[in-house]
Amino acid sequence: MAAPAVAVRAVAWLLLWEAAGFTCSPATTFNNTHFVSGIRATCSEIILRQEVLKDGFHRDLLTKVKFGESIEDLQTCRLLIKQYIPTGLFVDPYELASLRERNITEAVMVSENFNIEAPNYLSKESEVLIYARQDSQCIDCFQAFLPVHYRYHQPHIKDGETFIVVHNPDLLMYCDQEFPVLKCWAQSEVTAPCTLNSKDICQWNNMKYKSVYKNLTLQVPVGLTIHTSLVCSVTLLISILCSTLILVAVFKYGHFSL
């Protein structure tokens, strides 16, 4: 009697496990594991991190890009960052030219008719191309450096601050040879100069990535409208005083010949 009871109980447990979907064959388990590991190995994420260095109205925008897994012969690939500069910020093209001469960064303005003296409410969004460099301390990492500056903002009635949102850039990649993993990251193709000093045009892959931060938000102090009269009066008085002192010094110590 004991043996039939045990057999019936075993059959009942097997039926319950099958109904719950917990049973699987060894071959199925192996295939699923191989498929999942293949997806992870092929479609690893690109991680992008942006941060702002320094304090005050003159900052440095640092961009770091890390690939999920090491890619063989990554040195054959080039990474181009297309950064959108909001109206509250500006990039000095003359400063970029100086930094390029000193081999500090490889960035160039895309926008034309760019006025660095205009306040934020009279300026337009601009674009900068930054050719990222491989990080010497990370085999599958790139980084790029861009100096940015705050524009003047209109005074506010109450709050003495405003905020600037820096949206995530476009990440473009070009490789001299094809990698299977690029098919997972590439979204579309974009034309851009192959290198900073080259007139040749390459087809760059617009890459999808995961950003550590959704967007960068910068806090900017602004003046208050209730201080307009005071600021104008003090500025006028200081200008008159300084002009008077300069005239006195000129007439006292200057040498005039008729």
Image (spheres, helix red, strand yellow):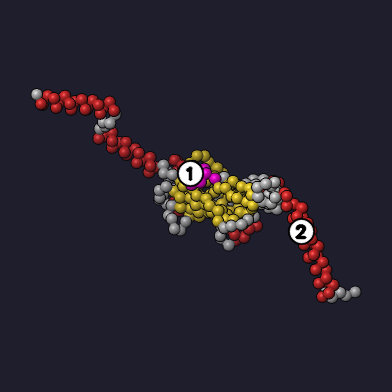
Could you tell me residue 242's position as x and y percent?
78, 65
Location of residue 54 (image quadrant): bottom right
Q: Amino acid at mark 2?
A: Val
Position of 207 with respect to 148 (left or right) is left
Magenta residues, as a range? Answer: 203-215
The residue wearing badge 2 is 234
Considering every residue shown, the one lying at the far right of the view is: 258
Image quadrant holding the C terminus, namely: bottom right
- Between the C-alphas of marks 1 and 2, the distance is 52 Å
- Answer whether residue 123 is visible to the viewer in this image: no
The circle drawn on residue 223 is none
Residue found at x 9% / y 24% = 1
Residue found at x 16% / y 24% = 8
The residue wearing badge 1 is 209
Q: Amino acid at mark 1?
A: Tyr
Could you tell me residue 139's position as x and y percent?
42, 54
Could you tell me residue 58's position as x and y percent?
62, 57
Residue found at x 74% / y 52% = 228
Callout in the foreground (1, 2): 2
Location of residue 39 (image quadrant): top left
Position of 70 with respect to 13 (left or right) is right
Whether 21 is drawn above or below 181: the answer is above
Position of 96 with respect to 50 (left or right) is right
- Asked whether 87 falls inside the magenta stretch, the response is no
- Asked whether 212 falls inside the magenta stretch, the response is yes
Q: Secondary structure at mark 1?
A: loop
Front position in the image: 104 or 72: 104
Q: How many marks?
A: 2
